[in-house]
Image (cartoon, grey):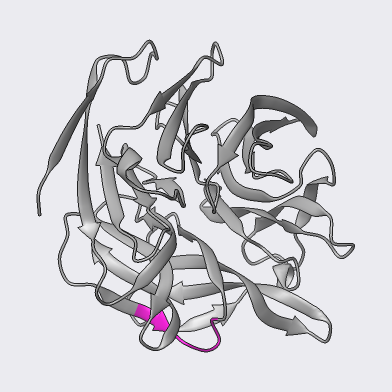
C-alpha cells in the first residue's frame, strides 16, 4: 500500500507544523460502504461497520493493513452504524439503529467479543436508536456515551455505566436534530456532531453541566458525523464535507480559541465522509470513507 505523507502547517497548538501520516488500512473487496471505524486502545487494530457477503457486518483489520476478518456478520445485525472499542480492547460496542428491541421499538447496542465474535446486547439501551458511541473508563468500568433518540423520538444523549440497568439521559431535544458523532473529554465535556435538518445546517455542540454550547455551525457534516479529540484534548477533529463541492474534509477545531481550519489533502479526493475515532492511548485515528465502495484510513501524528 502506498503511504501518503501530509504536512499541515496550521495555527492550531496540537497540530502546528506536524506531519500526519495517512495510510489505507483496508480497501474494498470483502466489504462495501463502511460507515464508522474505531481503533483498539493501542491503535493496532481497526474495527468498522460495513456491508459484507453475509449482510450487515463488523470487520477487523490491522491498522497497518492486511487481511480483513469479519468479526460478526448477518443476524442479529441489521443496520450497524456506530462502533467503539472497549477500554481494554476485549470487546467492541456496536450501535445498530434498526435491530429489533421490542414491539414497536428498534435500536440495540451489541457487544461483540473481539476474539470469539460472540454477540450479546445491552438491555439498558434497547430501543434508544443508538447511532454514535464514545467510551471512557471510570473506576475500571466502561462508561458509554450514546447519541440516539428517546421514547418520544427526540434526539438525545445518554450515559451508561456498562453493567447497570438504566442509561441516564444527559440531554434531550433541541438544538439537536440528527446527532451522528460523539466524543467525550477526560473532564466530562461531551462534544456532539449534528447533521441538522438540511445539508448546510450541521453543527458541533459542547455539552457541559447539561448546558449546550455551539462550537461549530453552518457546516456540512459527514454521515455518520465523525468526531474525535486529540489525546491532549486541545483539538477536535470533525469529519465533514466541503461547502462548495461534494468532497470530504476534516475540520480541526482549536478548543481554546474555537479557530477552525480545514484539511482537504488526501481526504478531499473522496465524495463522502464517515465515522472518525481515536485510539484511547495514542494519537492514532480511524477514518471511514463512507461512499461506496469505501476505504478505511489510519491517520496518525
Q: For residue 86, what is the image quadrant?
A: bottom left
Q: x%, y% of residue 74?
A: 47, 87
The magenta stretch is 71-77
In the image, residue 61 sits, relative to residue 197, either above or below, namely: below
Residue 188 seen:
no
Name the residue at the front extreme.
245
Image-based side of 28 in relation to 129, left or right: left
Residue at x 35% of width, y 86% of height: 53
Q: Which image quadrant: the N terminus?
A: bottom left
Image-based side of 254 in relation to 154, left or right: left
Q: For residue 214, what is the image quadrant?
A: top right
Residue 15 seen:
yes
Q: x%, y% of residue 161?
A: 65, 57
Q: Which image quadrant: the C terminus?
A: top left
Q: Nearer the viewer, residue 228 or 136?
A: 228
Name the residue at the right extreme.
152
Image-based side of 111 in relation to 214, left or right: left
Q: How many marks?
A: 0
Q: x%, y% of residue 34?
A: 41, 64
Q: Nearer the viewer, residue 278 or 244?
A: 244
Residue at x 55% of width, y 55% of height: 141
Q: x%, y% of residue 184?
A: 57, 39
Q: Nearer the viewer, residue 296 or 115?
A: 296
Residue at x 36% of width, y 46% of height: 279
Image-based side of 32 in relation to 210, left or right: left
Residue at x 26% of width, y 39% of height: 266
Magenta stretch encompasses residue 225: no
Amino acid at each position: 500500500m502506498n503511504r501518503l505523507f501530509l504536512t499541515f502547517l496550521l495555527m492550531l497548538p496540537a497540530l502546528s507544523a506536524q506531519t500526519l501520516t495517512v495510510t489505507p488500512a483496508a480497501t474494498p473487496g470483502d466489504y462495501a460502504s463502511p460507515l464508522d471505524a474505531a481503533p483498539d486502545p493501542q491503535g493496532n487494530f481497526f474495527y468498522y461497520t460495513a456491508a459484507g457477503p453475509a449482510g450487515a457486518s463488523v470487520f477487523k483489520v490491522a491498522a497497518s493493513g492486511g487481511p480483513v476478518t469479519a468479526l460478526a456478520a448477518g443476524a442479529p445485525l441489521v443496520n450497524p452504524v456506530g462502533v467503539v472499542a472497549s477500554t481494554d480492547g476485549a470487546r467492541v460496542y456496536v450501535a445498530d439503529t434498526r435491530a429489533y428491541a421490542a414491539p414497536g421499538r428498534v435500536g440495540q447496542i451489541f457487544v461483540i467479543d473481539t476474539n470469539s465474535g460472540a454477540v450479546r446486547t445491552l438491555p439498558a439501551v434497547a430501543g434508544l436508536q443508538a447511532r454514535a458511541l464514545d467510551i471512557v473508563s471510570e473506576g475500571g468500568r466502561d462508561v458509554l456515551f450514546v447519541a440516539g433518540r428517546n421514547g418520544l423520538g427526540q434526539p438525545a444523549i445518554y450515559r451508561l455505566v456498562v453493567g447497570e440497568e438504566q442509561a441516564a439521559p444527559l440531554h434531550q431535544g433541541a438544538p439537536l436534530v440528527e446527532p451522528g458523532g460523539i466524543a467525550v473529554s477526560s473532564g466530562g465535556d461531551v462534544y456532539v456532531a449534528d447533521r441538522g435538518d438540511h445539508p448546510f445546517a450541521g453543527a458541533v455542540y459542547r455539552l457541559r453541566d447539561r448546558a449546550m454550547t455551539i462550537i461549530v455551525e453552518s457546516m456540512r457534516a459527514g454521515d455518520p458525523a465523525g468526531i474525535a479529540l486529540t489525546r491532549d484534548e486541545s483539538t477536535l477533529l470533525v469529519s465533514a464535507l466541503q461547502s462548495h463541492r461534494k468532497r470530504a474534509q476534516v475540520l480541526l477545531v482549536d478548543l481554546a480559541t474555537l479557530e477552525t481550519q480545514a484539511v482537504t489533502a488526501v481526504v478531499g479526493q473522496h465524495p463522502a465522509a464517515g465515522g472518525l475515532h481515536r485510539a484511547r492511548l495514542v494519537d492514532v485515528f480511524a477514518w471511514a470513507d463512507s461512499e461506496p465502495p469505501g476505504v478505511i484510513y489510519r491517520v496518525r501524528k
